[in-house]
Image (cartoon, coloured by chain):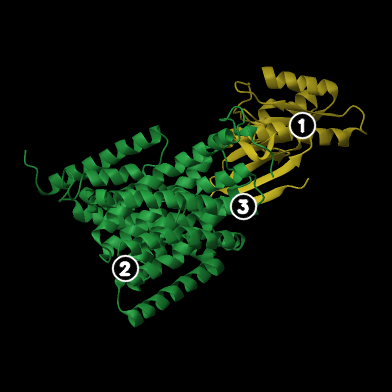
Chain colours: A yellow, B green
Amino acid sequence: MNVEVTPLPGIGVRKDFPIKSGHRRIGVIDRKDGTIDLILSRADNPDVTDQLHLSANEAAALANLLGAPQLVARLRAEHRELDGVNTRQFPILRGSPYDARMLGETEMRTRTKASIVAVMRAGQVIASPGPDFTFASGDQLVIVGTAEGLEAAAEILSHG
Amino acid sequence: MVFEGTALSLIQLGAVFFGLGLLGRLAARIGMSPIPLYLIGGLVFGNGGFIALSNVDEFIHLASEIGVVLLLLLLGLEYSAPELVTGMRRSWQAGLLDIALNATPGVVVALGLGWGLTGAIAMAGVTYISSSGIVAKVLNDLGRLGNRETPVILSILVFEDLVMAGYLPVLTAVLAGAGFLAGLKTLSIALIAVTVVLVVALRYGKYVSAIVASEDREIFLLKLLGAALLVAGFASAVQVSAAVGAFLLGIAISDSTAHNATKILEPLRDLFAAMFFVLFGLTTDPASIPPVLGWACLLAVVTTATKLATGWWAAQQAGASRFGRARAGTALVAHGEFSIVIAGLAVAAGAVPSEFAAMATTYVLIMAVIGPIAARVVEPILGMVARRPSPPQPAAEPHGE
């Protein structure tokens, strides 16, 4: 993908690229203060963009929504040859029993044979988190295991 | 109760701050820059105004000096040296057109009013420089940061700010008015100093950043403010204006240090810069405004047109549509803080007639208000002219030409 980077002196950097559907450009403005604006050029006018200001939290949530499925898809593709191994993602929702608790406390490996191989947080991938990793609402867990193992994992994460 | 000495000073200062706070709130309500309101606030008090603030004069004077230093320091912090260099390369043609079109009206009016060469040079700066603060705010408020013409507008602003770095020492030398040879000497010292500092900023910026950087907020603030005032003081001692010294220091500080510095200094700048605008208003006699009002209006009309032309031409070079060119032109119209900084230097040096302050105040008042309004209404108006349905929706404009 050919991302065009344009400096906006005093404000930050604009990064955008053309998308096929509707011949529009989509991208972000990375501001110096660390916040992000989402920009999408208007369908009928390539010169003008709609601009949405996102707080750091909102930008991270959006990055998760966009990034997590890709990571899962990639792991799934890698596991395709291995029969019975699946990859899925589960969110830690607000009020989830493991919100603000440590990974070790789920005893996921012992109880389900499934492994938490990665956590997506704030648009970052945290690979192979250790037992002392503390979950927070908004985290997306990437779990690998058998179909039954994954079902059991989902049960544990949502009901404890 | 006896209102004397310190008690009276505190009460006066408190009243000024509180009044500015209320004005600032009013400005935020109606979505405009507070600068014009601060100027009006200064006009209302001060010479020939309603109440004299005799007890806090000295404080306001020093505070306004610090205000100018902080204004320029933060302007420098906004840009990194490489940004300035690429901005300069990209926009030099538009930048030169900008100087030619927008400094000329100021020069012509100043000469026409018989203010001499000094007045002409100062007025050139006043009409030339757009307010990067107001422009950035307008672009952001109107959601135009992603537009095609926006990088063009911003790089013209960068060019203007760099020209400021060269222009201010020239202005200070001219204002000092020390004969031709002495003036030439001061000027060359100033320009050499600017060049040296700019090279240091480009090459050794990270060391400068390392010196002022600190984890501790308090230490950081003290080092930053101390460095800024020291540099500004030494700069003004060698006739490079204090403001330029601060600007160059700002450029030399880069990356995360610059970002933290901006965050920590912003409220301080707003406070002291407000004092500066008030002082400028204070030193302007409201009675001297009516005689220059006509000229100020004429100048406002002419420079609105010339700024529009500058932006139009520059955006055209970047391949923007008719609407984009108009947006770029109107975005540049706003004048504000730096026009007042220039006028403030001229007035403080006492090298210009008293009408100069009145002219600068009136002109900036008009331009600070016209700028944001012009940027807002340009699309509906062009839409109506093009007889498109639903004029408030700029989406109805034609594709790039």
Q: Name the residue under label 3.
A: A7
Q: Which of marks 3 and 1 is in front?
A: 3
Mark 3 surroundings: few (<14), some (14-19) or many (≥20) residues within 10 A: some
Upstream in sequence: badge 3 or badge 1: 3
The kind of residue tagged 2 is: Gly
The kind of residue tagged 3 is: Pro
Q: Mark 2 points at which residue?
A: B116
Name the residue rendered at 50%, 41% in the picture.
B375
What secondary structure is found at the residue carrying circle 1? helix
Among the 4 quarters of the image, the one containing residue A20: top right
Q: Is residue B356 left or right of residue B157?
A: left
Residues at marks 3 and 2 on the same chain:
no
Name the residue rendered at 15%, 51% in the picture.
B54
Q: Nearer the viewer, mark 2 or mark 1?
A: 2
Q: Is residue B378 left or right of residue B29?
A: right
Among the 4 quarters of the image, the one containing residue A129: top right
Q: Name the residue under label 1.
A: A69
Q: Where is residue B120 in the image (x, y as percent from the top left)?
A: 36, 65
Taking depth in this image into account, of A13 and B401 the one nearest to the observer is B401
Q: Taking B373 as reference, is B77 above or below it?
A: below
Q: Where is residue B161 in the image (x, y as percent from the top left)?
A: 48, 59
Taking depth in this image into account, of A44 and A35 the one nearest to the observer is A44
What secondary structure is found at the residue carrying circle 2? helix
Name the residue rendered at 29%, 41% in the picture.
B20
Taking depth in this image into account, of B26 and A105 the one nearest to the observer is B26
